[in-house]
Amino acid sequence: MITEKDIQTRTAEILMNAGFNVVASEVDEGFLKPAVFVSAYPSDVQPQCCGGALEELTVSVELKYISALETVEDCIGAYSRIKELFCTRLSILWTDI
């Protein structure tokens, strides 16, 4: 069975292979920028049959990009590169840091 940790690890590998600095989610300060934080967590569980013996699990992956330059252009460039790495349906919520 594939776990959330497996998904998080593989996502981090893809980003690192593309040249992104991926940081463990436990780090709050002292990391090199730019950096990407990767989190994976279950977002929906649907029982399928047999009294819940089988279930469909949806896992959400959250990528948080911390820019070195803190400019819109840098964030847009990173967004484009990340989107190309994974798929065209990737949505990233931009928040003020």
Image (tube, grey):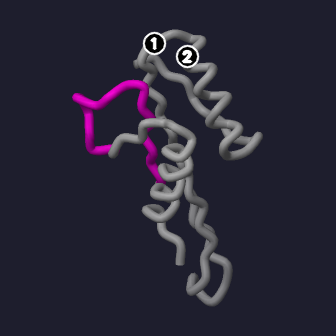
The residue lying toward the viewer, choosing from 50 and 15, is 15
Residues at badges 2 and 1 in contact (C-beta under 8 Å)? Answer: yes
The three-letter code of the residue at mark 1 reads: Glu
Q: Which residues are magenta?
A: 25-40
Image coordinates of residue 51 in percent, x first then y, are: 59, 86
* Residue identified by numbered label 2: 74
> Image height check: is 91 above or below 60?
above
Image point 43% across, 62% down: which residue?
5
Residue 42 relative to residue 55: left or right: left
Image point 58% across, 26% down: which residue?
78
Image coordinates of residue 89 in percent, x first then y, are: 74, 42
Q: Residues within 10 Å of mark 1 (few under 14, many from 20)?
A: few
Image point 37% across, 25% down: which residue?
33
Q: Residues within 10 Å of mark 2 (few under 14, many from 20)?
A: some
Callout 2 secondary element = helix
* Residue identified by numbered label 1: 70
